[in-house]
Image (cartoon, rainbow, N blue to C red):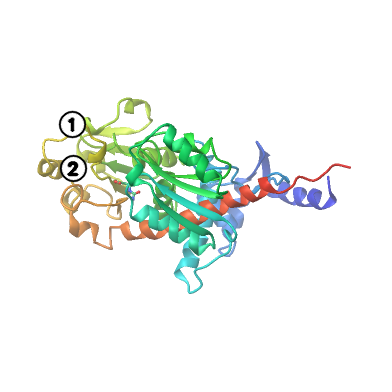
C-alpha cells in the first residue's frame, strides 16, 4: 500500500470505522464536528448518518455510488441515495445561480427513448443532459410503442450500435427497462416502467422533502390515492422505507395493491385518520391508462372522499407539505387552490429538483462508466 493512502487511511480511522468497504463515521465525532456550522460534511452526516468516504480502488468510479445503471430504487444502498441527493443539492444551488452549465457529461451522447407520452420527465432529462454538456437526442417512440418484445430488443441493439453513453428509457411495461439494460453497453436510466419503478421521481421527491424538512428520516409520510397502478408510489415507498420513515398509504381498497400488508407500511381508507400528524402529504394521479375496469364509483365521489383540500389537510401537522408528481388533475385528486398555495405546496420545487437530481444521477453514472472504460494498468 502506498504511504499516501496509509496516511489517508489513518486520518480516516480517527473519524470513521470501516464497515463492508464503507467508511462509517463515528457518531460522537460527527456530533462534535457538526456543532461547527461551516463543516458541511459533518452537517450532512449528522442529518442523515451517511458515511463520509468510500474506500477508493482503481476500478471504482465515484465514491459512494457503485451502480452502472439506475433501474430502480430497490438495488440502491442508503448511502448511494444520500450520495445522489448531496450532489443534486449542489446542482440545485448551481441552477439558481447565473452559471447553469457544468461539464460532467462533455463528450458523451445521451439518448432519450420514451415509449410512453411524457412532457415534464423528458424535458427534465433533456435539460439536465444539456446543462452538463452531453449531446442529447430525443427519439419519439410512442408511435411504435405497440410493438413489444423482440422489437424492443431490436431497437436496443440498433441504438447500441450508435455508441450512446447514457440511455434514458420510459416504457409502459414493467421490467422492460431492465431487459433493455441487459442488451446494451452503456448506462441506462429508468424514466418509469409500467407500474414498477420511477427512481428519479422518488429521488427528486426525497430531495424536495429533505430541503423542506431539514431531514429525511423519522418523518410521517402519507402517500394517497391510486397506489395500485403507481410506479411513483412504489419507488417512494422503497426509498423512504430505506431511510427509516413511517409510511402510510391512504386510498380506497380497490386502489391498494395486493400484498400491501407485507410492505411494512400502514394502510388507511380514510383521509382524516391517515393524515393525522403527518409531515408530508404526497398525492397521486388516478392512472386511468393502467386501469382495466371501474376502480372508483365516480371522480366526484372520489374527490369527496380522497381529494386533498384545505379541510382534509388540517388533520396533518400545521407545517405539513403537499406534494404531487404531476400531471395533476385539479378537482379530482387535489384542490386547485391548495396546489397553488406556496405556503403548503412544494409542487414547483419538485419540478426544480427533478432537473438537479437527473444531473446528479447522470454525472455519477458517467463517472462509473468512464472508470470502467479506462484501460486497466498492466502489472509488472
Ligand atoms: C408520473 C409518471 O409518469 O409515473 N409522472 C411523471 O413522471 N411526471 C406520475 C403520473 O403520471 O401520474
Residue 233: image x %, image y %? 34, 40
Q: Is residue 38 above or below residue 62?
A: below
Q: Which residue is mark 2?
A: 306
Badge 1 element: loop
- Residue projecting furthest to the right: 380
Tell me if mark 1 has few (under 14), some (14-19) or many (20+) residues whose alpha carbon lies within 10 angstroms of its own.
Answer: few
As measured in the structure, the alpha-carbon distance from the residue carrying label 2 to the one carrying label 1 is: 19 Å
Q: Which residue is mark 1?
A: 293
Q: Mark 2 or mark 1: name the one nearer the start of the chain.
A: 1
* Foreground pick, 12 / 129: 129
* Foreground pick, 101 / 251: 101
Image quadrant in which you'd find residue 19: top right
Specify whether 276 is left or right of 300.
Answer: right
Could you tell me which residue is drawn at 36 percent across and 58 percent down? 351
Between label 2 and label 1, give the one nearer the viewer: 1
Pick the quarter of the image with the C terminus: top right
- Tell how many labels: 2
- Labelled pair 2, 1 in contact (Cβ < 8 Å): no
Pick the quarter of the image with the N terminus: top right
Amino acid at each position: 500500500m502506498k504511504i499516501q493512502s496509509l496516511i489517508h487511511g489513518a486520518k480516516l480511522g480517527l473519524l470513521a470505522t470501516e464497515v463492508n468497504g464503507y467508511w462509517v463515521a463515528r457518531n460522537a465525532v460527527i456530533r462534535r464536528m457538526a456543532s461547527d456550522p461551516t463543516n458541511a460534511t459533518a452537517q450532512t452526516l449528522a442529518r442523515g448518518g451517511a458515511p463520509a468516504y468510500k474506500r477508493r480502488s482503481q476500478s471504482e468510479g465515484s465514491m459512494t455510488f457503485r451502480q452502472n445503471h439506475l433501474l430502480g430504487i430497490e438495488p440502491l444502498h442508503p448511502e448511494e441515495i444520500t450520495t445522489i441527493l448531496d450532489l443534486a443539492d449542489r446542482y440545485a444551488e448551481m441552477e439558481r445561480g447565473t452559471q447553469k452549465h457544468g461539464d460532467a457529461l462533455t463528450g458523451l451522447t445521451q439518448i432519450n427513448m420514451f415509449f410512453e407520452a411524457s412532457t415534464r420527465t423528458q424535458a427534465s432529462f433533456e435539460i439536465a443532459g444539456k446543462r452538463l454538456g452531453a449531446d442529447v437526442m430525443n427519439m419519439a417512440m410512442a408511435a411504435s410503442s405497440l410493438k413489444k418484445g423482440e422489437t424492443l430488443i431490436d431497437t436496443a441493439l440498433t441504438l447500441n450500435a450508435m455508441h450512446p453513453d447514457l440511455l434514458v428509457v420510459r416504457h409502459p411495461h414493467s421490467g422492460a427497462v431492465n431487459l433493455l439494460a441487459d442488451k446494451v453497453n452503456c448506462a441506462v436510466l429508468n424514466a418509469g416502467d409500467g407500474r414498477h419503478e420511477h427512481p428519479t421521481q422518488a429521488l427528486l421527491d426525497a430531495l424536495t422533502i429533505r430541503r423542506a424538512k431539514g431531514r429525511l428520516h423519522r418523518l410521517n409520510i402519507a402517500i394517497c390515492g391510486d397506489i395500485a397502478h403507481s410506479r411513483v408510489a412504489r419507488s417512494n415507498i422503497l426509498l423512504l422505507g430505506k431511510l427509516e420513515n413511517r409510511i402510510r398509504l391512504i386510498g380506497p381498497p380497490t386502489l391498494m395493491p395486493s400484498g400491501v400488508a407485507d410492505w411494512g407500511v400502514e394502510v388507511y381508507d380514510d383521509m382524516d385518520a391517515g393524515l393525522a400528524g403527518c409531515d408530508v402529504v404526497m398525492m397521486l394521479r388516478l392512472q386511468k391508462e393502467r386501469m382495466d375496469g371501474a376502480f372508483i364509483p365516480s371522480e366526484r365521489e372520489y374527490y369527496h372522499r380522497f381529494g386533498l383540500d384545505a379541510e382534509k389537510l388540517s388533520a396533518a401537522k400545521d407545517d405539513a407539505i403537499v406534494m404531487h408528481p404531476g400531471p395533476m388533475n385539479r378537482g379530482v385528486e387535489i384542490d386547485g387552490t391548495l396546489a397553488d398555495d406556496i405556503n403548503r405546496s412544494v409542487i414547483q420545487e419538485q419540478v426544480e429538483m427533478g432537473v438537479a437530481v437527473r444531473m446528479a444521477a447522470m454525472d455519477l453514472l458517467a463517472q462509473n462508466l468512464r472508470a470502467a472504460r479506462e484501460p486497466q494498468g498492466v502489472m509488472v
